Amino acid sequence: MPLSQLAKSIAESPTLRLNEEAQLLRDKGEPVIHLGIGEPKNKAPINAVLSSAAKLRGGDVKYVPTDGLPSLKKAIIRYTEENYGRMVAPENVIVSVGAKQSLFNLLFALLNPQDEVIVLAPYWVSYPEMIKMVYGVPVIVTPGDGSFVPRMEEIERAVSPYTRAMIVNSPNNPSGVMYPPELIADLVGFCERRAITLIMDDIYHKLVFDGKQAPSALSYTDADIESTHVVIVNGISKLYGMTGFRIGWVVARRELVSVMTNIQAQTTSCPPVLSQAAAEGALTGVQTGVENLRLLIQNNRDIILNELRAFPGVHVNKPDGTFYCLPDFSAYNRDSVALADFLLKKALVVTVPGREFGMEGHLRLSFAGAGKDLLEGVKRMKWALDPNAPNDIYIGDRKLIRDWL
């Protein structure tokens, strides 16, 4: 059976593939340490669970409005006012099956074939593939100075008459870096002047460390929500550790939300009512769990930084937020895919190749898990890569001898 050339050109998700490989090893009883997965280990907030359970107990689990339950949209409107300083209308909000679908529907609504989208490296693995799936062209901007923050001149040089949109994710997956306020301000001003849609992927915007605060793009424009070119994408997955509920949203001008609603109506019809009830419970319930999660992840950040800085030949930038870091392992192997496969095979440690994020020679490590797993994971990586590390190690109940260095 012949397949579409476009479909065949779309790469598989490396993070999901690694999750599956790790699970297969675990099913065989192997003591795998997973430093690749992007989800916190906390339980869903009790208000989220109770709200979803109440809806389930009532048994009224039917179709709901395509763009989201009115009560959930009300909670999102309040969240937007509290965190972005903007009052928006229900018609400016659309709820989708995760921020991932929000982004896809947004790109589908914005792009014509061969329209270009500026993507700042390092970038989340799905951005370029989503753009290609709607016949757009991803234009990657990689910082020339080796940092994770591009300069405005580099971004401007990449813009062409075909540029339709730009995606900005700050704090950034995979690096954990937060773009400085002056860069966000410059991006907003540039996109407003050039009528380029600035897509702010804010899924990590409250998971920020050391007393810092993520700058809101909407604070750098005087345009109202109906005339600004800034679009906000957010969701419950990261902030509340509710990855499996799959609820995200977009805040944008009414015309764009209306088109996205038509797209969603012809694909998923509506987000699941049980998940929407859970999202509403999370947004309107007690928020102490958010701060507890942030503090836990910040502590984990400090643990893994301390271990990586004692790792000879590895360079790592201090993350400002998220639960990821992107250390440079090119001193050991510039081929990050080969290096990640080697570490999984030899040390039973899951990492994600930097190549998938536009940063070859790096590995993305997640510190969302338990502190003891971070310590053990980096210890195994040192054993596998560093000639000065002890030659033997216990992994599980087996003693292994390194015989390749």
Image (cartoon, rainbow, N blue to C red):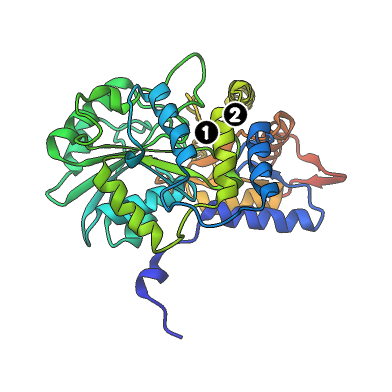
What residue is rendered at 31% in x and 21% in y? 181
The picture places residue 99, in percent across and down from the top left corner, at: 45, 45
The quarter of the displayed image where residue 187 is located: top left
Q: Secondary structure at mark 2?
A: helix
Inspect the image, locate mark 2, and give the three-letter code of the amino acid beneath it. Answer: Leu
Q: Are marks 2 and 1 in contact (CB under 8 Å)?
A: yes
Query: In front here: 142 or 323?
Result: 323
Front-most of residues 83 and 300: 83
Disc sitting over residue 325 in the figure: 1
* Cα distance in 3D space between marks 2 and 1: 10 Å
Residue at x 20% of width, y 24% of height: 222
Labels 2 and 1: the sequence-earlier one: 2
Q: Quadrant of the C terminus?
A: top right
Q: Secondary structure at mark 1?
A: strand
Most foreground residue, 320 or 308: 320
| Corner quadrant of residue 303 | top right
Callout 2 environment at 10 Å: few (<14), some (14 to 19), or many (20+)?
Answer: many
Give the labeled residue for mark 2.
Answer: 308
* Nearer to me, 134 or 83: 83
Q: Position of residue 163 (x, y in %)?
A: 19, 48
The residue sitting at 52% across, 39% down in the picture is 329
| Residue 71, image x, y percentages | 49, 38
| Residue 254, x across and y down, in percent | 27, 43
Between circles 2 and 1, the one closer to the viewer is 1
Q: What residue occupies the far top of the structure in this picture?
A: 211
Residue found at the far right of this picture: 397
Amino acid bearing label 1? Cys
Relative placement, left or right, of 294 versus 118 is right
Res 27 seen here: yes
